[in-house]
Image (tube, grey):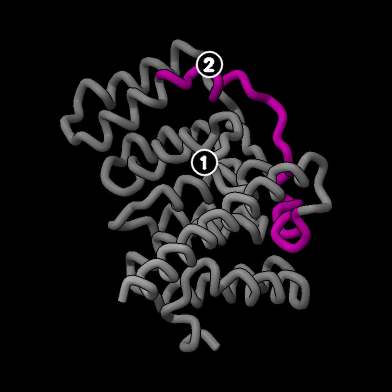
Amino acid sequence: MNADLKQADSRALHEPLRQRLVEIGPQAAFSWLTSVLATQSPSLRSSNSYLVAFTGCLEAIDWLERNVASPVTTHWGSGAALLGTPWPRLVNWLRADGPQRLMALDTFIAYRAPAPNMSPLAQIASPVLPEPPTSSEFQTELGEILRGQNAPRVRKAVEYILSLADEILDRRERGVAVKDLPRLFIEPDAFPGAEPILTQHERVRSEIRKGLQDLINQHTIEN
């Protein structure tokens, strides 16, 4: 089965992961998923990395830390935020530079208040930064990164995070506990407040599909 999923993106992995969460439980599903990800190309593994969060296994944070590598997409940080990676661990990543620093920055961004451009499951889960620092400590740590960094992506991310500092630090209520992430993946509509988020997401998907079909139809007529 792992060989069959070597080229699978998150959409293709969704149903196999859901089935394993139901049939064999989160811990075994985590082992299965990470074995699949180990066979994939770096770019595909990167885009699928956040899926480990939906096992609800805290060792998934260790997996993210060990495996994050170029290309570092925002999916690594999304997964780390869903798993509730706390401030002290994020500081270690910030100071490590390289891929771990990028993952830390994306994790902070994923700790902002739920927004329409986030995935529906992330909006429902609404992850919150555990063990948050004081505003002064937060500003100092990120300011150090900003002063010593010339990479445009890092500077842009730090500036954005600092603009969201109050939002990131003051939020205290998660929408879904880490231990309940497997259930969220299996039956998202069972959670309070999920219905309007899922409905809006499906509406947008339908509009995109219709737009693509209209383009195809138009191209077919013209040719």
Q: Which residues are magenta?
A: 163-188
* Viewer-closest of 135 and 43: 43
Q: Residue at x 43, y 74 (%)?
A: 38
Disc 2 from disc 1: Cα separation: 20 Å
Q: Which residue is mark 2?
A: 166
| Residue 140 placement (x, y as % from top left) | 36, 16
> Vertical placement of 102 versus 206: above or below?
above
Q: How many marks?
A: 2
| Quarter of the image with the N terminus in it | bottom right
Q: Are marks 2 and 1 in contact (CB under 8 Å)?
A: no
Dot 2 or dot 1: first in sequence order is 1
* SS at mark 1 in the image: loop
* SS at mark 2 in the image: helix
Answer with the quarter of the image where residue 116 lies.
top right
Dot 2 crowding, Cα within 10 Å, few <14, some 14–19, many 20+:
few
| Residue 83 showing in the rendered view | no
Residue 117's tag is 1
Amino acid carrying label 1: it is Asn
Q: Main secondary structure of the magenta part?
A: helix
Q: Is residue 17 left or right of residue 164?
A: right
Answer with the quarter of the image where residue 186 lies.
bottom right
> Vertical placement of 205 versus 4: above or below?
above
Dot 1 crowding, Cα within 10 Å, few <14, some 14–19, many 20+:
few
Amino acid carrying label 2: it is Asp
Q: Residue at x 26, y 45 (%)?
A: 98
| Residue 146 placement (x, y as % from top left) | 26, 24
Reply yes or no: does residue 166 show up in magenta.
Answer: yes
Q: Residue at x 69, y 44 (%)?
A: 197
Reply yes or no: does residue 38 show up in magenta.
Answer: no
| Residue 19 placement (x, y as % from top left) | 71, 75
Q: Is residue 100 left or right of residue 20?
A: left
| Residue 35 showing in the rendered view | yes
